[in-house]
Each structure stands twice: as C-alpha cells, then as structure tokens.
Image (tube, helix red, strand yellow):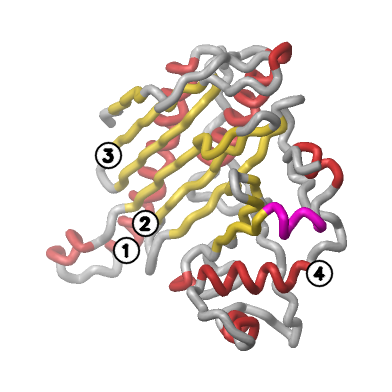
Amino acid sequence: MTLKSNFIAAAAFCLILLSSCKGSEIKTRTFNFDNTGERSDFTMLVELPLSTRGVAGEIRNQLIDIMDHQLSSIGLYDGGRMFPKYDGDLSNTADLLEYYCRKGSEAIETHAMDFYNEVKQNVEDEEELEFIPRCEYDFTLGKVYESTNFVVYLSEDYNYMGGAHGGVSGMGDITFDKRNGKIFDNFLKADALEPMQGLLEKGLAEYFEEPDGSDDAASVRERLFLYDGDTTIPFPAWTPSPDEYGLSFTYQQYEIAAYAMGMPSFTIPYDEVKPFLTPEAIELLNLK
C-alpha cells in the first residue's frame, strides 16, 4: 500500500496558548493525508495545537484521543478496535499522524475487501464486478471557531461502507474551555427543552425553508420522526456549540427526519437563547 501525505499550514497562526496566557489564540497546524487502496479511498484532515504544554497541550491530547476513537473503530459497531492506540511519543506529530493514516487506511481497506468478496459471490457475470462500488472514509478534526474563553472543533467523518448510501458520523462540534482545557458541554438548563420548543420550531422552519406563518409548527412536525403521539422536538444528540452569532444546533441524518432531509441545523441568536443557558455557559460566553 502506497501512503501519500501532504502537510498544509493552517491559514492563520497566532500566539501559542499556555496555561499562563489563557485567552490567547491557539497556534495550530493542519495536516492533510489521503490514500487510495485497491478497493477503498481514505482521507484525513487533522488540525492540532502546536504546543504540547499547558492548556493547549491538554486540548491537543484530547483531540488525539478523539482521533484514536474514531479511526480505530472504522467498520465496527460494537465498541471494539481495529488496531491498538499509538504508543509512541505524542509530541512527534509526524509519526503520530502517519500511524493513524496508515492504520485507518488499512482498516477501511479490510472492510472494503470483505464487502467486495461478499458481493462477488452473488455476481454471475464477471463484467458486473467493475460496478461494485468502492468504500470510502473521510475523517475531519479541525478548528471551526475560537474566542477568548473557548475554541470549537468539528469531529466528523463521512463513510461509505457499501449499501444504498454513505453517512456522516463523529462527535460533531466540541467546545473546549480555554481556561482549563476541558470539554464544555453544560450549555442548556435541565428544564430548557419544553420552553425552547418555539425556538426549535423556528430554527427547523428556517432550515426547511418554510414560509413565515401560523402553520410553520405543523408543517415542520410533518417532516419529523415523532413517535407515540409525542409532539416534543428533542434536542440533538450532538452537543450545541457557540459561534459568533449564537448557539448552533445540528441533528444527524435520520435523527429526527428522513435521510433526504440531510442534517437539519440552525443557530439560535444569543439574545433569544440566553434565558435557557446555564450560569456556567453565560460566563463562558461572556454574556453577562
């Protein structure tokens, strides 16, 4: 297997974030890899903090853990692993990422060959073999927004493992508190769901491009998977994330609507969502 790797410098470089300078932007570098196997295609885009110390180092280590979890489970649905965790020097970024690119490529290729051989058994005309689709795995772990107190990373992968179509998985947007380097996910009050139904309806109506009017809620609900007479729109499984304008919500494919509806997403402005935020979230977002 031939491995091709390209290193792409991040668009913007800022001061290194250490524990002694919380609030500074994190200096990062983006690494882009791709590999073509006999029956599969693999790509990996990973953006990591350059510093291995302090708060930036803490965030870096957690991003490595996320990468390990996602790539080691390619093709598995039982919580198992396709390969062991990297046990070398975590500060050696080139070796670290080369390992995960190579192992991730091998994992999707193993699945692709199994899929090909299974389908091949049911093909009577050898000319039809060329129409058996290739498998694909595209992994992304990159910074999407940063402010004084927090930085948001997107963990997302697209995979086609055979069948009717591919799908998107991953952890979605992950917010790191730059004051301590930990993941922050305590945005909404425990009792926020019911009083936020109107805001969820409005956001989904905008995503579905419903016209403004009194029938928006009914029209939105007709598109959703709501069972057993429960008309409550749930929060998405992915934790909402902050950006420049407000708190963003993203539902995964099939989570509340048909595959053809994509991944319903919308942003609720801060002035509208603030009454439902926890005190910790208000402090993190500087909304006092």
Report which quarter residue 282 is drawn in.
Answer: top right
Q: Which one is in front in this view, the residue at disc 3 or the one at disc 4?
A: 4
Q: CA distance from mark 1 to mark 4?
A: 50 Å
Q: CA distance from mark 3 to mark 4?
A: 49 Å
Report which quarter residue 130 is drawn in.
Answer: bottom left
Tell me the kind of residue under disc 4: Pro
Q: Secondary structure at mark 4?
A: helix
N-terminal-most mark, 3 or 1: 3
Q: Residues within 10 Å of mark 1 (few under 14, many from 20)?
A: few
- Whether the magenta-drawn stretch holds residue 274 is answered as yes
Q: CA distance from mark 3 to mark 1?
A: 21 Å
Residue 143 as seen in the image, left or right of residue 12: right
Tell me the kind of residue under disc 3: Thr
Q: Nearer the viewer, residue 152 or 134?
A: 152
Q: CA distance from mark 2 to mark 1?
A: 6 Å
N-terminal-most mark, 3 or 4: 3
The residue stretch that appears in magenta: 270-276
Residue 36's disc number: 3
User: Is residue 82 in sight in this rendering?
Assistant: no
Q: Secondary structure at mark 2?
A: helix
Task: Please report contact status of discs 3 and 2: CB closer than 8 Å, yes or no.
Answer: no
Residue 195's disc number: 4
Q: Secondary structure at mark 3?
A: strand
Residue depicted at 47% across the width and 47% down the height: 157
N-terminal-most mark, 1 or 4: 1
Q: How would you classify the magenta stretch by its main secondary structure?
A: helix
**Where is mark 2, residue-wise?**
115
